[in-house]
Amino acid sequence: MNKILITGAAGQIGVELTQVLRDKYGAKNVVPTSYNKPAYGKFIQHETCLSLDVRDASALAQLVADAQCDTIFHLASLLSAVAEAKPLEAWDINVNGLLNILEVARTYHCAVFFPSSIGAFGPETPYFNTPQDAIQRPKSMYGITKVSGELLCDYYYHHYGVDTRGLRYPGLISSTALPGGGTTDYAVDIFYAAVKNRHYDCFLRADTQLDMMYMPDAIAAAIQLMETKAATLKHRNAFNVAAMSFTPAQLAAEIQRHLPDFTISYQIDPIRQAIADSWPRHLDDGAARAEWGWQAHYDLAATVADMLKHITLNEQKINVKVPIKSFS
Ligand code: VAH
């Protein structure tokens, strides 16, 4: 990777990925782009983040040609809960936007990173130790766009030789950027509520078990995959990756080890509960471990400790957003 374009750079993954790539490859070799005017992320406030709508194929092509990129981390996407509220827009951004990326990658010989999700599986897939190669019949529009994305990325690899690679991410937890309307957002909102209010009203049931990952592991996985020699990959789109699997009740108990007066209550959002109930509880990430040496470093205890440390330090600077109650 020499010159890197990032779409969705102001999003939950993009904010941290942009900083890590800039530290590793040099700021002048990383081109962050965003549809929304970035509201946070120190690097974005002080540096240029180009405006880009991935549905605009000609603007995208012009930007890649001008920047002479050889790698695209394509993060721009509507997440599960927002996608369920706006399914046609989700298809347009998540699939037609990806198609524009793949066409530009084919034309300008770029490698492409595509973030898939545990949401690419549905209730017909084994919930536990979900295999790398398994039936994928997601019930949410988000999941349908992610399966379609995986298939499109494999198609462009096999038919045009585009170097496409992807990860099936679990719920991601970041201390730097807030999530953007997903089913797993509770696992981030809970920390801000705990630090600020010592109470959180959770929109998923106490026993809803889901795979989760701390953002530093998620960023490291994406970069490690893109730096891996192509010959060692048997799979491409997309690899199961896992780090920890927990329920809201288990996360609350771990927070209470640091903040004993923290309490949690439950006000279920039926739409996000239905999405979560259709997703795997824990993926088998053996293929990622075998083919490119994947290994998570943060478990639940380490994640909670690091999140509370960062958020408490930044508490004065962050206007804690009231968690989005429901998308119905
Ligand atoms: C979402 N955070 O909730 C995303 C992710 C596995 C969850 O895909 O939509």
Image (cartoon, helix red, strand yellow):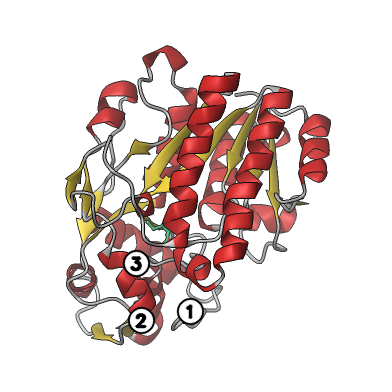
Would residue 10 be visible to someone looking at this image?
no
Residue 197 in view (yes/no) = yes
Q: Which quadrant of the figure has residue 131?
A: top left
Residue located at (60% from left, 20% from top): 160
Task: Say whether residue 289 is left or right of residue 41.
Answer: left
Using the image, tell me which numbered label, if any, was put on residue 275: 3
SS under mark 2: loop
Three-letter code for the amino acid on which mark 1 is drawn: Phe
Which residue is at 49% across, 52% downward? Answer: 145
Tell me how far mark 3 sits from mark 2, CA to CA: 10 Å
Name the residue beneath numbered marker 2. Answer: 269
**Residue sitting at x 65%, y 48%:** 97
Q: Position of residue 91 (x, y in %)?
A: 58, 57
The type of residue carrying mark 2 is: Asp
**What residue is at 44 percent from the left and 21 percent from the top?**
228
Which sits in the foreground, 258 or 249?
249
Q: Could you tell me which secondary element the residue under label 1 belongs to? A: loop
Report the Cα–Cα distance between label 3 and label 1: 12 Å
Mark 1 is surrounded, within 10 Å at the Cα level, by few (under 14), some (14 to 19) or many (20 or more) other residues, namely: some
> Which dot marks residue 224?
none
Q: Is mark 3 within 8 Å of ligand 1?
A: yes
Marks 3 and 1, the one that precedes in the sequence: 3
For the residues labelled 1 and 2, say whether their Cβ atoms are less than 8 Å apart.
Answer: yes
Q: Reading the chain from its start, which is encountered first: label 3 or label 2?
A: 2
Identify the residue under disc 1. Answer: 327
Above/below status of 18 relative to 38: above
